[in-house]
Amino acid sequence: MKDLNQKDDFIQSQARTYFLRLLTRLRMNYLQRLDKIRNKTP
């Protein structure tokens, strides 16, 4: 059972890392889009 729990923890940490990376990328895209809109308007 211990091995199973360790595996589960590993999967959860991997999922969390992936999710955080995804959020960071989305935020960067959003900020870049905001900058483009701001630059277009004088």
Image (cartoon, rainbow, N blue to C red):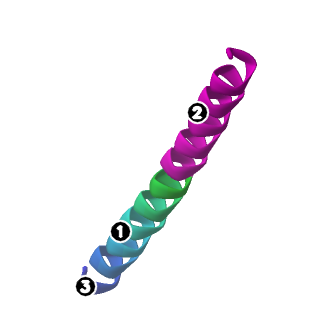
Q: Are marks 2 and 3 in contact (CB under 8 Å)?
A: no
Q: Position of residue 41 (x, y in %)?
A: 68, 14
In the rendered view of the protein, which quadrant contains the N terminus? bottom left
The answer to if 12 sits in the magenta stretch is: no
**Labels in figure, total:** 3
Q: Nearer the viewer, mark 1 or mark 2?
A: 2
Q: Residue at x 52, y 41 (%)?
A: 27
Establish if 14 lies above or below 23. below
Q: Looking at the image, which residue sits at the far front?
A: 42
Q: In terms of sequence position, does the residue under pointer 1 or pointer 2 come before the other?
A: 1
Q: Residue at x 28, y 75 (%)?
A: 5
The answer to if 23 sits in the magenta stretch is: yes
Q: Which residues are magenta?
A: 22-42
Circle 1 sits on which residue?
A: 8
Circle 3 sits on which residue?
A: 2
Q: Residue at x 39, y 69 (%)?
A: 13
Name the foreground residue: 34 vs 14. 34
* Real-space Cα separation, disc 3 to disc 1, in angstroms: 10 Å
Circle 2 sits on which residue?
A: 30
Establish if 9 lies above or below 30. below
